[in-house]
C-alpha cells in the first residue's frame, strides 16, 4: 500500500536537509506520495521538489520563542490539508511545532538529528530536557540516528518508543574517488585557494560553520599540524553564522582556505587526503559518511554517532581538545599512502553498513508499525479541532 508522508523540517541546509532529500528520493521511488514542509530559501525545498516531493511553505525560525505558537498553528493547517498517513518531524523546531500542532493524533515520527539540550547549558538545557520528557508522548516513534543518541535520551529521562536507524549515504551519487579524480579536483579547485600546494597533503572540513561543528577548535589545532607537516593545507567547506569570525581567525594561519558554501561538496571530498569533523555534538553526522563513500578516511571527535559510523579499529578524539586533534591530524597527513589505504577500507565499511536504500526501507518499517491495523494508506483529517 502506498502512503502519504509529510516531512517537516526547519533546517534547509546541511545534513538534516540532505537526509530529508534522500528519504524523499527513496520514498518516491517506492511509489509513495511525499510532501515537505519547510521554510523558503536554502537547498531543501528545491532539491526535495526535484526528487519528487510536493513542496509546502512553512516559515519557521531556528530557535524557540514568541513565534513558535504561530509556527505550530501554520503547521497544523498544513497537516490538516495534506491529511498524511505519517508525519515525520526533523530536528528540534519541527519536533516542537509539530507535536504541539497535532498532539500525536496523526501517526508521528520525531527525529532529533542530535538533541537540542546538548547544544545549550544551564536553564535552557534543563528546559529542553523537560520538554522532551513531556512531548515524547506525542510521537509514535522517536527515531535516533545512533545508539548513543538513544542512550543520551534515555539518560535524560525521556521515556519514548525508541527506534534507531543509522544515517545512510547514496552510494551511487557518492562514489569512490581515485587518484585521477583527486588530481582533477585539485586542478579545478586549488587555483582559487592561494597558498595551497596541489602536491601537498590536504585536510578538508565539511560542515556548517557554527559552534556545533567545532571549526574553531580545528583552527586552534592547525598551527601544530602545520609545523609537523610542512606544506599541508586545510580547507573549510560550508557556510553559516560563524563564517566571518572563522575567516578572521584563519587569516593569521598558514595554508588555510575557507571555500564557502558549495552546491556540491563531492569535488572537495575528491581533493582531500583526509576529512576532519571536530564536532561538539551530533546525532550521527552525514558528512563523514559521504567522505567515506568517496574513499576518504575521516577524523572525528567522540560525539554521538562517531564510534558507530567508523570502521572497526578507528577511534575518535576527545571533543574540544585541539592538542589531541592536532596530533592525530598531523600523524594522518604525514602519511598520504596510509590515508589512501584507510579510505578504501572506509568505502567498503560504508557500503556494508550505511547504504541509504537500507535506511529508506528501515524508516518505512517504522512508519508502517504506527499505522492502524488494516489501514488502506489514506488518511482522514485527524488533527483535533481545539488545538
Image (spheres, rainbow, N blue to C red):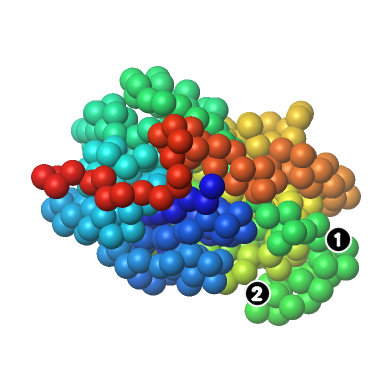
Q: Which mark is residue 178?
A: 1
Q: Position of residue 263 (x, y in %)?
A: 57, 71
In three-dimensional space, the C-alpha distance between marks 1 and 2, rounded to whole angstroms, equals 22 Å
Label located before the other in sequence (1 or 2): 1
The answer to whether marks 1 and 2 mark residues whose Cβ atoms lie closer than 8 Å is no
Res 2 visible: yes
Given residues 312 and 253, the one toward you in this image is 312
Image coords of residue 66 (percent x, y): 13, 53
Looking at the rendered structure, the secondary structure element under dot 2 is: loop
Q: Nearer the viewer, mark 1 or mark 2?
A: 1
Dot 1: element: loop
Residue at position x 36%, y 39% in the image:
107
Q: What's the residue at 44%, 53% (across, down)?
A: 4
Name the residue carrying label 2. Answer: 193
Q: Position of residue 27 (x, y in %)?
A: 56, 54
**Quarter of the view holding residue 50:** bottom right
Q: Is residue 340 left or right of residue 75?
A: right
Examine the rendered structure and indicate whether residue 81 appears above or below residue 380. Answer: below
| Mark 1 surroundings within 10 Å by alpha-carbon count, few (fewer than 14), some (14 through 19), many (20 or more) | some
Along the line of sight, the residue nearer the viewer: 183 or 379: 379
Amino acid at each position: 500500500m502506498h502512503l502519504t508522508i509529510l516531512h517537516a523540517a526547519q533546517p534547509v541546509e546541511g545534513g538534516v536537509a540532505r537526509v530529508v532529500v534522500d528519504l524523499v528520493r527513496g520514498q518516491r521511488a517506492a511509489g509513495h506520495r511525499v510532501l515537505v514542509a519547510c521554510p523558503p530559501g536554502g537547498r531543501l525545498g528545491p532539491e526535495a521538489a526535484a526528487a519528487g516531493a510536493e513542496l509546502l511553505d512553512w516559515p519557521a525560525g531556528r530557535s524557540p520563542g514568541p513565534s513558535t505558537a504561530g509556527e505550530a498553528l501554520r503547521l497544523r493547517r498544513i497537516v490538516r490539508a495534506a491529511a498524511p498517513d505519517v508525519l515525520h518531524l526533523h530536528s528540534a523546531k519541527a519536533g516542537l511545532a509539530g507535536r504541539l500542532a497535532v498532539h500525536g493524533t496523526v501517526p508521528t515520527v520525531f527525529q532529533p538529528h542530535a538533541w537540542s539540550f546538548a547544544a545549550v547549558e544551564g536553564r535552557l538545557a534543563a528546559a529542553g530536557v523537560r520538554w522532551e520528557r513531556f512531548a515524547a508522548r506525542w510521537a509514535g516513534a522517536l527515531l535516533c540516528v545512533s545508539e548513543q543518541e538513544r542512550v543520551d535520551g534515555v539518560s535524560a529521562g525521556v521515556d519514548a518508543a525508541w527506534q534507531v536507524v543509522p544515517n545512510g549515504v547514496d552510494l551511487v551519487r557518492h562514489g569512490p574517488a581515485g587518484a585521477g579524480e583527486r588530481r582533477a579536483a585539485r586542478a579545478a579547485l586549488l587555483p582559487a585557494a592561494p597558498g595551497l600546494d596541489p602536491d601537498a597533503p590536504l585536510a578538508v572540513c565539511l560542515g556548517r560553520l557554527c559552534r556545533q561543528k567545532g571549526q574553531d577548535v580545528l583552527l586552534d589545532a592547525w598551527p601544530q599540524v602545520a609545523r609537523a607537516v610542512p606544506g599541508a593545507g586545510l580547507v573549510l567547506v560550508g557556510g553559516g553564522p560563524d563564517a566571518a569570525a572563522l575567516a578572521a581567525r584563519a587569516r593569521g594561519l598558514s595554508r588555510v582556505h575557507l571555500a564557502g558554501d558549495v552546491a556540491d561538496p563531492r569535488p572537495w571530498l575528491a581533493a582531500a587526503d583526509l576529512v576532519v569533523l571536530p564536532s561538539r555534538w551530533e546525532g550521527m553526522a552525514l558528512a563523514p559518511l559521504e567522505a567515506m563513500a568517496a574513499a576518504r578516511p575521516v577524523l572525528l571527535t567522540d560525539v554521538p554517532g562517531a564510534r558507530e559510523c567508523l570502521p572497526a579499529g578507528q577511534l575518535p578524539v576527545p571533543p574540544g581538545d585541539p592538542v589531541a586533534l592536532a596530533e592525530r591530524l598531523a600523524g594522518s597527513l604525514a602519511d598520504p599512502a596510509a590515508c589512501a589505504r584507510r579510505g578504501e577500507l572506509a568505502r567498503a565499511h560504508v557500503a556494508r553498513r550505511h547504504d541509504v536504500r537500507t535506511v529508506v526501507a528501515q524508516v518505512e518499517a517504522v512508519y508502517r508499525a504506527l499505522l492502524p491495523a488494516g489501514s488502506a494508506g489514506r488518511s482522514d483529517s485527524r488533527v483535533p479541532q481545539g488545538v
